[in-house]
Image (cartoon, helix red, strand yellow):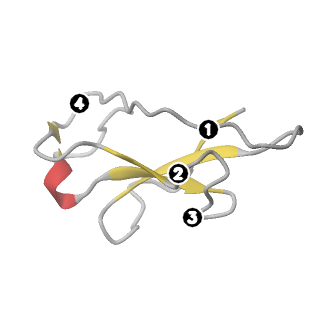
Amino acid sequence: MKNTGSKAWDGQAHAHLHSQDPPDNTTWGTHSILQGQGTSVAPGAEKVYLSQLKAPGTPGEFSLQWRLVQSQKAPFSASPRHGR
């Protein structure tokens, strides 16, 4: 993720990726991927979020969408990130 804003993303402020479609789902084993306490992402810098996700237990197609949010689940941007 690239910080295209004018303020740093502060790990202490609990910036993290949060599952979407549906919101708060744990289809992939968790509903959030933390930025990391004590880390900061300066404007113009990029952050790689790492996590070990767990595939659903049943065969099929499942949505994998995440959105960068702040501590109160307020999104940083209007569109979630997609993956399959």
Give the labeled residue for mark 4. 44
Nearest the eye: 57 or 76: 57
Report the amino acid beneath label 2: Thr
Give the labeled residue for mark 3. 24
- Secondary structure of the residue carrying numbered label 3: loop
Disc nearest the viewer among 1 and 4: 1
Q: Give me the residue at 54% from left, 47% from top.
A: 66
Tell me if residue 77 comes above or below residue 73 in the rendering. Answer: above
Sort mark 2 into few (<14), some (14-19) or many (20+) by Cα contacts within 10 Å: some
Say left or right for 54 vs 31.
right
Instruction: Give the image location of residue 49, x and y in percent.
Output: 38, 33
Separation of disc 3 and disc 4 at Cα?
28 Å
Give the labeled residue for mark 1. 54
Looking at the image, can residue 10 be seen? no
Report the amino acid beneath label 3: Asp
Instruction: Give the image location of residue 33, x and y in percent.
Output: 41, 46
Give the labeled residue for mark 2. 30
The N terminus sits in image quarter: top left
